[in-house]
Amino acid sequence: MPKMKTKSSAKKRFKVTATGKVVAAQAGKRHGMIKRTRKFIRDARGTTVLSDQDARIIKSYMPYDR
């Protein structure tokens, strides 16, 4: 059986925690920060845990990162 391929874009952007949850950077912080509220910028700091539906998609991109 040949090895499965990992999507390089996914392994650069996401990380799987020890409990199996998928962690990603917060979205919406690349540009246009003037129009964002201070609360949005504060809450979007760091990383976030993806929803179960999104995590299932990302885990299919990284078959060995479980």
Image (cartoon, grey):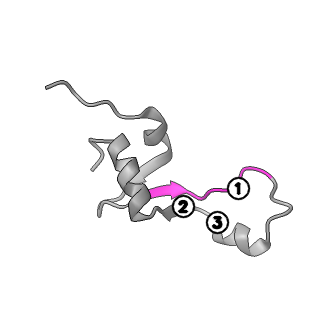
**Residues tagged 1 and 2 counted as in contact (Cβ below 8 A):** no
Q: Is residue 17 magenta?
A: no
The magenta-colored residue range is 23-31
x, y (%) of residue 60? 33, 45
Q: Earlier in the sequence, mark 1 or mark 2?
A: 1
**Magenta: main secondary structure:** loop
**Residues tagged 3 and 1 counted as in contact (Cβ below 8 A):** yes
**Residues tagged 2 and 3 counted as in contact (Cβ below 8 A):** no
- Residue 44 is tagged as 3
Q: Which residue is mark 1?
A: 29
**Secondary structure found at label 3:** loop
- Say which quarter of the image contains residue 41: bottom right
Please report the residue visible at 71 percent of the width from the left and 70 percent of the height from the top. Answer: 40
Three-letter amino acid code of the residue under disc 1: Lys
Regarding residue 22, the answer to whether it shows in the image is no
x, y (%) of residue 64? 26, 41
